[in-house]
Image (spheres, rainbow, N blue to C red):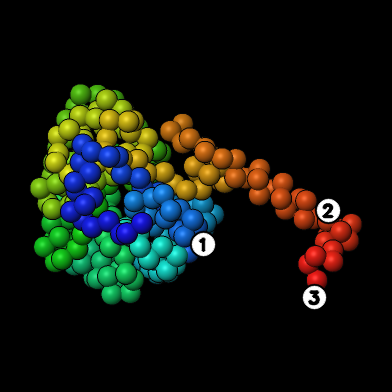
Amino acid sequence: MKKLTLSALKKRKNNLPIVMITAYDALFARLLSESADILLVGDSLNMSFGGNADTLSATMDQMIYHTNAVCKGAPETFVITDMPFGSYSDEGIALSNALRVYRETPADAIKIEGGADKAHLVKHLVDNGFAVCGHIGLLPQSVRAEGGYKVKGRSEEEALSLIADAQAIEQAGAFIIVIEGVIADVATRVAQSVSIPVIGIGAGNGVDGQVLVFSDMLGLYEPFVPKFVKQYTNGATVVKEAVNIYKNEVQNREFPDENFIY
Ligand code: KIV
């Protein structure tokens, strides 16, 4: 599959839904890229790979290391790098960290969390030559400030505020928006209120595409399975069963047999 361009992605608005999935390393990037339109090097790697309780301690160095691995594994796939917490707290900081992503990796775009309040940052980055993906709704980087992960769009006031967020991010020049943890009907209204693609996660089926964390959708991450996650395979069981067979064969001296020796 040839890498999609920004204009090809924009044309997917109200069209064939965009398939986005997170990737953190070359091994999985190669496998996932066979079906994904976009690989997102999400700061969620700080949880499933880093073993941390949330995304907030992810660093620029980490994001750059994982982005390079993903780009090497999937050189023909559009890659978005998540800007970690604190890396875009003002225009100057955002620009210098975004420059690190483009100078130190071949990533195609960056993603920042926030709505109308972050539109000036999106505009500053776009004006300086960056392709920016917005991220509105439930913002994982706000988990400590909000005291938990809160689904958004439960009132008409919240719905209107999400629409205003999406329109501000579009106006600022973002080419695509991720909408997370939003009541499905509201996410549909948000998607219909802008002319750029809106990719949902926990936001129903009325949007322009879907994104899932790969370790969630492969059933590899056991500590917590959010309601919106469909596990397409039971990866944890598959891995544990295989390693258990290996353990038994090693302990019984069945492995390696004559097929696996020099
Ligand atoms: O970090 C991440 O994986 C994300 C997705 C949840 C969209 O931002």
Q: Residue at x 82, y 61 (%)?
A: 255
Mark 1 is surrounded, within 10 Å at the Cα level, by few (under 14), some (14 to 19) or many (20 or more) other residues, namely some
Question: Could you say whether the residue bearing mark 1 is in a helix, strand or loop?
Answer: helix
Q: From the image, tell me which residue sits under label 2.
A: 248
Determine whether, in the image, residue 81 is placed left or right of residue 195.
right
Q: Which mark is residue 56?
A: none
The residue where tag 3 is placed is 262
Residue of label 1: 27
Label 2, label 1: how many angstroms apart (C-alpha)? 27 Å
Give the residue at x 27% y 39%.
Answer: 16
Image quadrant assignment for residue 178: top left
The percent position of residue 36, horizontal first and vertical second, equals: 38, 50
Which tag, 3 or 2, sits closer to the chain's start?
2
Residue 145 visible in rendering? no
Residue type at mark 1 is: Leu
Tell me if I can see residue 64 in this picture.
yes
Question: In x, y percent, where is residue 27?
Answer: 51, 62
Q: Position of residue 183 (x, y in %)?
A: 31, 28
Q: Is residue 126 above or below residue 161?
A: below
Q: Nearer the viewer, residue 161 or 208?
A: 208
Q: Secondary structure at mark 3?
A: loop
Report whether 209 appears left or right of 123.
right
Q: State the residue lying farthest toward the right.
A: 252
Residue depth check, mark 1 versus mark 3: number of the one nearer the observer: 3
| Front label number (3 vs 2) | 3
Residue at the image position 84 percent from the left and 66 percent from the top: 258
Q: Amino acid at mark 3?
A: Tyr
Q: Residues within 10 Å of mark 2 (few under 14, many from 20)?
A: few
Residue 77 occupies which quadrant of the picture?
Answer: bottom left
Q: Which residue is more in the foreground, 203 or 29? A: 29
- N-term mark: 1 or 3: 1
